[in-house]
Image (spheres, helix red, strand yellow):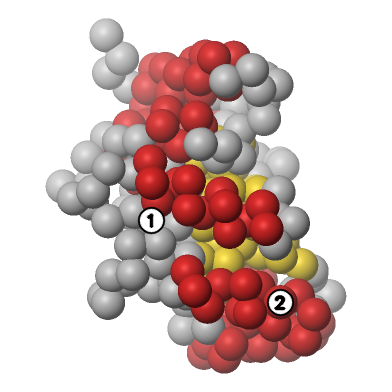
Amino acid sequence: MADTATDRLAAVLADIRSAEAEQGRAAGAVTLIAVSKTFEADDIRPVLQAGQRVFGENRVQEAMGKWPGLRQEFSGIELHLIGPLQSNKAREAVATFDVIHTIDREKIARALKVEMLAQGRDLPCFIQVNTGEEPQKAGIAPKEADAFIRLCREDIGLTVIGLMCIPPVEEAPGPHFALLQKIATRNGLAQLSMGMSADYGIAVSFGATHVRVGSAIFGGRG
Ligand SMILES: *Cc1c(COP(=O)(O)O)cnc(C)c1O
């Protein structure tokens, strides 16, 4: 039985590799982002020791507290910001993270660009799309996505590599993943950040290139 984070990591990776094979995709086509939010460095360390290097956090402040130390212990860490960002945290975000998944407003896009130039760090970015058009949820509306992607790339000059979504919890995720893929394709974007613990297999079948998996690896967040 998979009862440690290391066992569960291996199980999730095996799942992803078999989903890739089923879809006729290359082994390693999908990057696993291990979402370590709410977990302490001591919980994360065994997963690093098992070889995982790509992690996701949803809060800048929390990430700043635990990742600089872990980066000193382990080389090759790639840290992804997967939570909403306030523009007054842009400096810390650019200094702490390697990839940003949650760009959805002009103000935050511009603040990040200013910081990337100031720090000489050109971070790859995903634009978050609110595929379910949920009023409380972050993300650009699907009908505004094309214009916003163009603004971020051409006007602001961000390195936009793909799109990210979080489907509504009470709906089947497939149609949301399909919509994200469609918007990405028509905008020439190759990367899709979609799929969490409950639905990463489905996400891979819809072309996910990055799955964000937390509780299936680290356990419940209580
Ligand atoms: C917490 C979180 C995840 C991981 O969720 P699990 O269900 O624990 O896998 C993925 N994406 C985002 C944006 C999150 O905030």
Q: Which residue is located at x 56 percent, y 72 percent?
A: 145
For residue 116, which numbered disc appears in the image? none
Residue 12 in view, yes or no: yes
Kindly identify which residue carries mark 2.
150
Indicate which label's residue lies in the foreground, 1 or 2: 2
Q: Nearer the viewer, residue 153 or 176?
A: 176
Residue 34 located left or right of residue 156: left
Provide residue 186's location: percent of width, then percent of height. 67, 58
Cα gap from disc 1 to disc 2, whole angstroms: 22 Å
Q: Which residue is located at x 76 percent, y 67 percent?
A: 159
Kindly identify which residue carries mark 1.
166
Q: Residues within 10 Å of mark 2 (few under 14, many from 20)?
A: some
Query: Which amino acid lies under the numbered mark 2 shown in the image of this protein?
Result: Arg
**Which element carries disc 1, helix, strand or loop?**
loop
Check the image and report above or below for 208 versus 87. Answer: above
**Quadrant position of residue 83:** bottom left
Q: Which residue is located at x 33 percent, y 69 percent?
A: 133
Residue 191 located left or right of residue 1: right
Q: Residues within 10 Å of mark 1 (few under 14, many from 20)?
A: many
Provide residue 47's location: percent of width, then percent of height. 48, 31
Query: Which amino acid lies under the numbered mark 1 shown in the image of this protein?
Result: Ile
Q: Mark 1 vs ligand 1: CB under 8 Å?
A: yes
Q: Quadrant of the N terminus?
A: top left
Q: Which residue is located at x 45 percent, y 57 percent?
A: 165
**Which element carries disc 2, helix, strand or loop?**
helix
